[in-house]
Amino acid sequence: MAAILKLVQGSREWLDHRLSTRNASETPIVLSCSPFSTPYDLWLVRTRRKEVHVNAAMRRGQELEATARAAYEAQTGHVMQPLVMQDGSYSASLDGMTLAGDVVLEVKCPFKGKASELWQAVAIGELPEHYWWQAQHQLLVTKASRVDVFVFDGSEGITREVVPKPESWEMIHRVWETFEKYLQTDTAPPLCERDIHVRDDPDWVAAAAAYVDAKGVSDRAEEGVERAKATLVSLAVHPRELGGGVSVTRYWKAGPVDYKKIPELGAVDVAKYRGASREEVRVTVVE
């Protein structure tokens, strides 16, 4: 049974709450179908490596939410109350819910209004996949009979109903369980195509060309070093030989420990002994 939380949406307490629960607006992200964010980007936010940036579109939605709710109420006769609800580890911040708890309101205020792709889709009875999954998450938490996605242009709005599809909720559980493991182990999810930003500005292109040239010189020098080293090793007979400013020494080194073969460690959770993950940077020449 879902509980109603006494949280003001947008408050510090609400933001902290979102960092510890599985939120409806984030389900499309962990499903990798959100056009706005990726699992990697969400992982950065949830591990406090990055703060959520309130962009112009988000600000517009916040500013118009109350007006849109009033327009929806006038259009439908429903009285809608904004709520934050939680069922177990799943949470939903609702733009509105009827007193009976049977209808949930989700407001969308696209910049382009009636000219937006979202308005055009809803006008013909369709809804983008990421919003459908957000609505299913809300239904999973609230057990309402439907979500009304209300697309508002600032003065008028149209509605697309989403009804519960409980068979889809297992997918929501599954992807969140996978994402939760990334959080628990402090391991970044794999990057996807939308994590890649293609650069063609002059500063980047110049720096990239300089790196490619320098890397080529370095690789050729390294190959020369390895060839000369192999020749010296083939010429060395004694445990240590010295000459021409170079020393060649032969020595024995203990082999590495294969911890997987130690039976006493079989039941030990080594993850809790691992240090915090750290960001590393890899620069690669792309052929």
Image (spheres, rainbow, N blue to C red):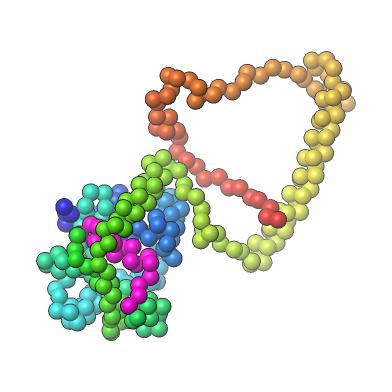
Q: Position of residue 26 (x, y in %)?
A: 35, 58
Task: Identify the residue at horizontal 85%, vertical 29% (top origin).
Answer: 231
Residue nearest the viewer, comparing 265 with 73: 265
Query: Does residue 110 appear in this view?
Result: no
Q: Position of residue 77 (x, y in %)?
A: 14, 79
Query: Does residue 2 appear in this view?
Result: yes
- Taking 123 as reference, is 146 above or below it? above
Q: Quadrant of residue 51?
A: bottom left
Q: Main secondary structure of the magenta part?
A: helix
- Taking 149 as reference, is 188 above or below it? above
Q: Is 71 displayed left or right of 281 in the figure?
A: left
Q: Is 101 displayed left or right of 168 in the figure?
A: left
- Taking 30 as reference, is 256 above or below it? above
Q: Which residue extends farthest left? A: 100
Q: Position of residue 3 (x, y in %)?
A: 16, 54
Task: Identify the residue at horizontal 18%, vertical 68% (top origin).
Answer: 103
Residue 133 magenta-drawn?
yes
Q: Which residue extends farthest top? A: 238
Q: Is 175 displayed left or right of 1 in the figure?
A: right
First to last magenta residue range: 125-142
- Taking 51 as reference, is 241 above or below it? above
- The count of marks equals 0
Task: Identify the residue at horizontal 17%, vertical 71% (top origin).
Answer: 80
Residue nearest the viewer, comparing 127 with 151: 127
Residue nearest the viewer, comparing 143 with 180: 143
Residue 107 magenta-drawn?
no
Q: Position of residue 186 (x, y in %)?
A: 42, 42
Q: Quadrant of residue 25?
A: bottom left
Q: Quadrant of the C terminus?
A: bottom right
